[in-house]
Image (tube, grey):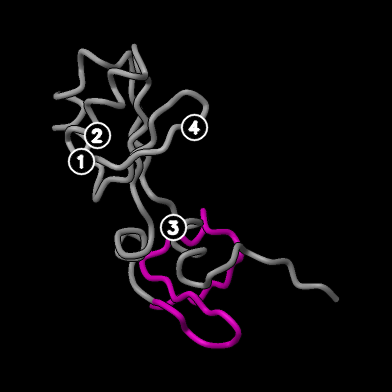
Amino acid sequence: MTVFLTTHYMEEAAKADYVAIIDNGRISAKGTPSELRAKYSTDTLRLIPKDSERLATFLNEQNIKFIISSGAFIINISNTLGALPLVNKAESLISGFEVISGSMDDAFVNITGHAMREDSD
């Protein structure tokens, strides 16, 4: 049996077995939620430094690109498991870390080029 569900809520779409993103009447992308997230969103590693200068030096020496936001070092990673080697190497330089998986909202924006919009009547 097939159930066809339309939704504007990406958290609902993330629970589906298969998703098609339709933008301006055309299918822009389709696949399982995990396939779409893997292809169109980015996992992120957030490092909380003990000493910002030392952590920045370490990351630059490793040729790792980062941005600093609210005192945390934000690094795009290919997948969540990719964070482990870096966290282990930087353990003495950080007081904490967070690994954030890419979301269906991120995938939607990257597929369509814009955030979800409300229809105006």
Residue 31: x and y in percent read 34, 72
- Kindly identify which residue carries mark 4: 69
Q: Who is closer to the viewer here, 44 or 50?
A: 50
Question: Real-space Cα distance between discs 4 and 3?
Answer: 28 Å
- In this rendering, the answer to whether 117 lies above or below 29 is above
The image quadrant of residue 119 is bottom right
The amino acid pointed to by label 2 is Asn
Tag 2 near tag 1, CB within 8 Å:
yes
**Residue 10 located within the stretch drawn in magenta:** yes
State the SS at label 4: strand
Question: Real-space Cα distance between discs 2 and 1?
Answer: 5 Å
Question: Real-space Cα distance between discs 1 and 4?
Answer: 19 Å
> N-terminal of the two: label 2 or label 4?
2
Tag 2 near tag 4, CB within 8 Å:
no
- Kindly identify which residue carries mark 3: 14
The amino acid pointed to by label 1 is Asn
Residue 81: x and y in percent read 19, 40
Residue 102: x and y in percent read 39, 50
| Residue 60 image label | 2
> N-terminal of the two: label 3 or label 1?
3
Q: Nearer the viewer, mark 2 or mark 4?
A: 2
Q: Who is closer to the viewer here, 77 or 57?
A: 57
Q: Residue at x 38, y 76 (%)?
A: 30
Residue stretch rendered in magenta on the structure: 1-29
The image quadrant of residue 68 is top left
For the N terminus, which image quadrant?
Answer: bottom left
State the SS at label 2: helix
State the SS at label 3: loop
Q: Nearer the viewer, mark 4 or mark 3?
A: 4
Q: Residue at x 35, y 52 (%)?
A: 42
| Residue 25 image label | none
